[in-house]
Amino acid sequence: MPNISKNTNTLTIAASSERHAQPKYARPASESARAGRFRTALFGGMLVAILLPAFISLGMWQWRKAETKVSLQHELDARSSGLPVAMPSEPVDAESLRYRRVVLHGTFDAARQVLIDNRLHREQAGYHVITPLRLAGSNMHVLVNRGWLPAAADHRILPGAGVPSGNVELTGIAVIPEQRFFNLAAQPITGWEPVWQNLDLARFRAVVSYPLQPLVIMLDADAPGGYLREWPRPDERSERHRSYALQWFGFAVATIGIWAYFLLRRP
């Protein structure tokens, strides 16, 4: 009889050897770990090289915005604390009067009054009332921001903004209007519209026949002939910008930390 027991043992040993045998092409564990670390270092390093400068740049951008606002507030506090100066009837350098308190004598031009749309006061939409004032004894005009009025629920209904008649004496802070702004729709360059999206001095000069100072006077709260005047501070929301900056810097630190963790951890 064939030796069945012997053949069976031989087959069992052979099968066991095949199960425990390492394939000839298998990579040693240490070599595989080194390859994994190399891929982590390479791709992780590429990602860090992209994200880290971006996060730092965004953080510095927000920090500079905060510093600029604080600097403007310091300048306003310093320059507006002096005695008021009379607004010249000759063209002035805007920087020489920026944030200075000025005294105005003259008459308003009611026909060229304009409402600046989408001005918020405590989260309520409204308008800023901009009225040109002709300086006494000259043809020079200066724009006066007489304050804020709420908008009606129906935007087609404009608020009544009466204009004082006759000679007036006013005080306010001279500011340089924004030169860069965003319009929701194309603005006409000719003709006259009672409502504008932004106060554009170049556009205003193009539709009036008289000279105009390169400034806007923010009417004092106690001056006559105005509306609600709670002017925003230049440093408004500066702390929020600093908070955003710290968040971006935190993202930069976290990016390095995550990459280092995956790079240095043991397999």
Image (tube, rainbow, N blue to C red):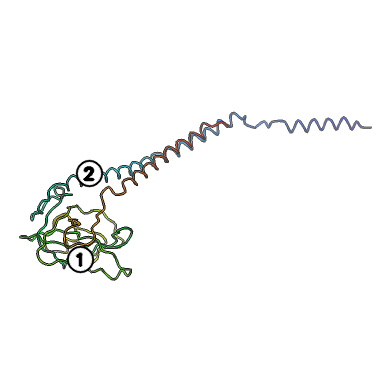
- Name the outermost residue toward the right: 1
Report the front residue among 6 and 155.
155
Specify whether 213 is left or right of 266: left
* Spatial CA span between label 2 and label 1: 39 Å
CB-based contact (under 8 Å), mark 2 and mark 1: no
- Name the outermost residue toward the front: 222
- Locate residue 108, reporting x and y percent: 13, 64
Query: Around disc 1, counting alpha carbons within 10 Å, would you say few (fewer than 14), some (14 to 19), or many (20 or more)?
Result: few
Specify whether 45 is left or right of 242: right
- Locate residue 86, reporting x and y percent: 9, 53
Amino acid under disc 1: Thr
The residue at which mark 2 appears reads as 74
Which mark, residue 190?
Answer: 1
Specify whether 218 is left or right of 156: left
Q: Quadrant of residue 50?
A: top left
- Locate residue 9, reporting x and y percent: 84, 30
Q: Which residue does the image show at 25% across and 68% down from the upper left?
A: 159
Report the front residue among 203 and 77.
77
Amino acid under disc 2: His
Q: Quadrant of residue 47?
A: top left
